[in-house]
Image: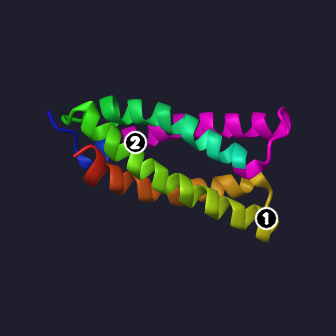
Amino acid sequence: MALTYSQSLVRYFISGVSAVALHFLVLACLVEIAGLHSTIATTIGFVTGSLLNYTLQYYWAFAASTNHAQSLTRYALVTATTAGLNALLFWLLTQRLGVHYLASQALVTAVIFLINFEVNRRYTFS
């Protein structure tokens, strides 16, 4: 049975929150404990969260009927694009505007969330 738009959105939100929590945890640990530059740390956190997110989205949020090879290839393309956008927006906010790295990531995450939902719903898992 196919999920409705609102069911997918709610499930996407829950899986996204889980992935974002992991992203922020990795980001904060790499900056605060490992002393890594925040733009590098957010990129690593983004990729880590994305791995969790793919699994949750494929099986639960979108109940995908496509095979993993197709979905994972599409997801990797979308994720690589949004990871670049994440890093760019994050860098602009932190390095150019002086916004604290956690606040910057919160703002960027909101933008990326909206873009990812539509692209993944219409392209990756369709």
Residue located farthest toward the left when viewing the structure as drawn: 1
Viewport quadrant of the N terminus: top left
Which residue occupies 22% across, 44% down?
4
In the image, residue 34 lies in the stretch drawn in magenta: yes
Q: CA distance from mark 2 to mark 1?
A: 31 Å
Q: Which mark is residue 12?
A: 2
Asked if residue 55 is positioned above or below residue 101 in the image, the reply reads: above
Q: Report which quarter residue 92 is drawn in.
A: bottom right
Q: Which mark is residue 95?
A: 1
Mark 2 or mark 1: which comes first in sequence? 2
- Which of 22 and 87 lies nearest the eye of the viewer? 87
Q: Residues within 10 Å of mark 1 (few under 14, many from 20)?
A: some
Which residue occupies 27% across, 52% down?
123
Q: Position of residue 21 (x, y in %)?
A: 61, 36
Residue type at mark 1 is Gln
Q: Secondary structure at mark 1?
A: helix
Q: Report which quarter residue 114 is drawn in.
A: bottom left
Asked if residue 26 is positioned above or below residue 79 in the image, the reply reads: above
Q: Secondary structure at mark 2?
A: helix
Question: Magenta segment, which residues?
Answer: 10-39
- Which of 26 and 117 lies nearest the eye of the viewer? 26
In the image, residue 29 lies in the stretch drawn in magenta: yes
